[in-house]
Image (cartoon, rainbow, N blue to C red):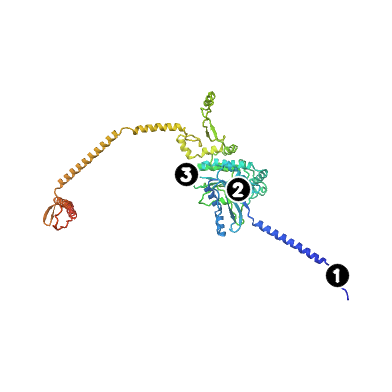
Amino acid sequence: MATNTNRYSTYTTASTGSDSRNGEKEKKELWSSMLDTVASAKRLPEKNILLLGGSVDSQREFFESLSKNELRRNTDRQGSRKPPIANSFALGYTYYDVLDADQEDTLARISLYTLTDPSPAFASLIQPLITPQSIPNTLIVILLDWSQPWKWMRQLREWILLLRTVFQKLNRECSATMEEVMTVWRERGRGGGLNLDGTSAVPTTSTDADVSLPVGPGEWEDALGMPLCVVCQNAEKMEHLEKTQGWKEEEFDVVLQFLRTILLRHGASLIYTTPSLPSQLPTLVHSSLGIHSLLKKQPLKHNVIDRDKILVPPNWDSWGKIRVLREGFDVEAVSSGWTADLSIPWPRQPQRVANGDDQQQGEANDNETGDEEQEPDEDEYEEPTEPDGSSVALYEASVQDPTMDALHIAGSSSHSTKLEVQTTETQQFLEKQLKLLDVYKQKNEEPTGHLARIKSVRKTTSDSLTAEDDQLKQQAEAKVLEHIGPVQFNMGGIQVDADDMLQRLKERQAFGTSPEPLSPEGETVEETPQMDTENLQAFFTGLMNRSRQS
């Protein structure tokens, strides 16, 4: 029996097993990488808007005007409800998705954080929202309303001071991120690179492609650390100011010049909106957040001509363009005054008003002896005065509150926050009222005889006047009858006196209505039908009137 001399190698089997394990690992890694790629592609870019100012209703109007198309598309496509807007208390929140032009792809999800009151107590609510990751994707929006344009500078100062207070408490990493963001924004649209709307900034010459334009005077001198946009809502109320307050183009131009000068220092944008008219607000806000449609470009066009459609993009304005709007505007003074406004301590504490009798009262208290403690006098407080050259003071002097003008005419104080009514002590007030009550009581306790005599005289006079009127009326009727004479007419060939006939009818009617004596028992009296005297009287009266007319 021949033996099998063939040799079998085990290398192939071993290598095949190891290769299969390696192939499985590679497949797992391939699938995991593909899944991670798909997940990252489907992950929406998250953007934030910090919405400050306005009221609860005006913030809702801003959200609806910003997300009107996106919400309608999401509702039609998904059948879902609109996201709720929770902005009634303190820090509010809502969100919406930005869709592309084809209404299919979602470009980003925007979260809105709202705040209506610039109170220092709310600074702790804003600080957690500012992180190194959220700073490059956050836009600050401040709402103003055309119903009260004379308060705009003061409102802007309060909000910016609140933001600066929050930003000063951030860590170094957040501060460094803010500096990088402001550097990119400062160079955007200057020379080469991209504009805010995503279009390319074409340089004047090919040599200027790598050279950016220098920053002009008054630009980017008070950068906040994040982009800022100011929205002036309800521009249709400008007509109301014209009709009721007598505003002219000069007042509207002054308001615009102040706003542009102040916002130029922060590198901010400005836009006027009307609820019933389309505007470039969505394009401005989405471009500021870096959201651009890949299918349809929406260029951002500045507008400083139409007073109700103003749009000033960042890095477009300058002092020269502001001066052209109207001559006589001191742009340097307003810009430097804003620096003084931002240097004041915040929050501002009311100042005590010193009374003239304080020193005398203090000396008197020092001279008095005894263990009794003196009650301190109530102090009066007023708002602190504005710094020298304040832009807020210059603005309020140019754009005055009409209600304060009426108070000035009435002779009230010129300070807008001082109390106009001074209260008195309770005991002094009651003492004055007691004296008035005594006077009224004495008047009510006078004898009523005089009043009774007056009433009797009035009654006698009215009775005499009534009797005289009746007598005059009878005399007039007698004269008329005497002038006309008896009224007679022919009825069936017989001459009848109308007055005599009416008198007989009245007597017969009176006789018919008088009570008749009871008839004795047992006797029956035939009842005679009662004559219709009213018809007869009307008949003869008609004949009399007919004869008189003839």
Say what amino acid the circle numbered 1 marks. Answer: Arg
Indicate which disc residue 242 carries: 3
Say what amino acid the circle numbered 3 marks. Answer: Glu
Image quadrant occupied by the N terminus: bottom right
| Residue underneath mark 1 | 7
Rounded to the nearest angstrom, the CA distance separating label 1 from label 3 is 109 Å
Task: Answer with left or right where residue 442 lies relative to residue 158.
Answer: left
Rounded to the nearest angstrom, the CA distance separating label 3 from label 2 is 34 Å
Query: Looking at the image, can residue 267 be seen?
Result: no
Query: Looking at the image, can residue 365 be seen?
Result: yes
Indicate which disc residue 201 carries: none
| Residue underneath mark 2 | 139
Find numbered disc 2 in the image and state the secondary structure of the residue it sits on. strand
Displayed quadrant of residue 345: top right
Q: Residue furthest left?
A: 494
Residue 89: % across, % down: 55, 46
Find numbered disc 3 in the image and state the secondary structure of the residue it sits on. helix
Say what amino acid the circle numbered 2 marks. Answer: Leu
Instruction: Work out whether residue 473 or residue 282 is closer to the camera in this orientation and state it.
Output: 473
Instruction: Work out whether residue 236 or residue 66 is closer to the camera in this orientation and state it.
Output: 66
Nearest to N terminus: mark 1 or mark 2: 1
Residue 215: % across, % down: 63, 43
Nearest to N terminus: mark 1 or mark 3: 1
Residue 126: % across, % down: 60, 45
